[in-house]
Amino acid sequence: MDADPVFKALADPARRALLDSLRLRGGQTLSELMQGHAMSRQALTKHLDILEAANLVVSERRGRERLHHLNPVPIQEIADRWIGRFQAGPLRALADLKKSLEDQDDDH
Amino acid sequence: MTTSRFLYVTYIRTTPEKLWEALTKPEFTRIYWHGVTHVTDWTPGSDWKLVFADGRVADSGSIVEAEPPHRLVIAWQNQFRPELAAEGVSRCTIEIAPQGETVRLQVTHEIDADPSKFIEAVSGGWPAILSNLKTLLETGAPLPMANEAPKD
């Protein structure tokens, strides 16, 4: 996983506010997002591009509009990387140890 | 009536065929679906069930569309929490598209209720399942997960 774009996207409070807003109400258009956030259309588009590049926002075309959704999967992947794997390492080490011990038995 | 609609997207270094297999074969799904199993033959019109390890049915419905290895649509209704079951049948669309050296997996879950308790419930589950699926396909080992079967 390339986590850099995710951390960069999350480093800006305005972009985190956009994610909060999409968490509360998914599928917002650019105009709807502009109403809730005091920024120009140009600034909003730039922030959304960064969030989309990080896969934190997914947009889909509906007629003439573009609907924006929060995609929390990259944040889950970051959590799994440092929390889930913490357990995975020792478990895999144990599995590998068991396998190598059993393989030695086979050699006898 | 308004619709609640959630999208989940992940990019996995694999092939559409392997991803389809991981999404539909019980020996794979059991590993990354928190111990629940899909019971279905994955053909359009067939029944579909999500079953806890202890045999209770979590959700049920039917396969609406199945185009291996690109698209899967499930008519999906909760069965173990009455307030979620009362919202009726949701629609889960799974789309697989190759993108460069990865495969883009999109899960869209929607229901004709807004706000929706059902969508709220699945929105906590999908990111963990997709992250776990990605780990399984890219490293061959899933993350260890607690069995999350809810209590009655």
Image (tube, rainbow, N blue to C red):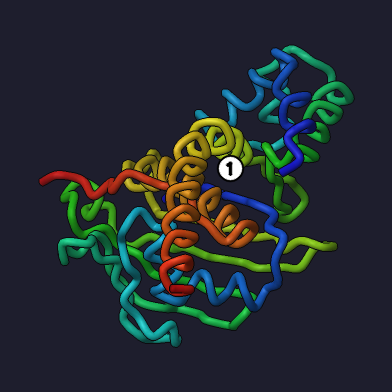
Q: Position of residue B78 (x, y in %)?
A: 26, 58
Q: Position of residue A18 (x, y in %)?
A: 66, 24
Answer left or right for A20 relative to B28.
right
Residue at 54%, 76% in the rendered image: B21
Q: Mark 1 belongs to which subunit?
A: A
Quadrant including the N terminus of chain A: top right
Residue at 73%, 23% in the rendered image: A34
Q: From what the image shows, is residue A25 above or below residue B10? A: above
Answer left or right for B128 relative to B34.
right
Can residue B3 be spotted in the picture?
Answer: no
How many other residues sit within 10 Å of disc 1, few (<14), some (14-19) or many (≥20)? Answer: many
Residue at 22%, 62% in the rendered image: B53
Residue at mark 1:
A73
Can residue A33 be spotted in the picture?
Answer: yes
Q: Position of residue A30 (x, y in %)?
A: 74, 33
Residue at 33%, 47% in the rendered image: B118
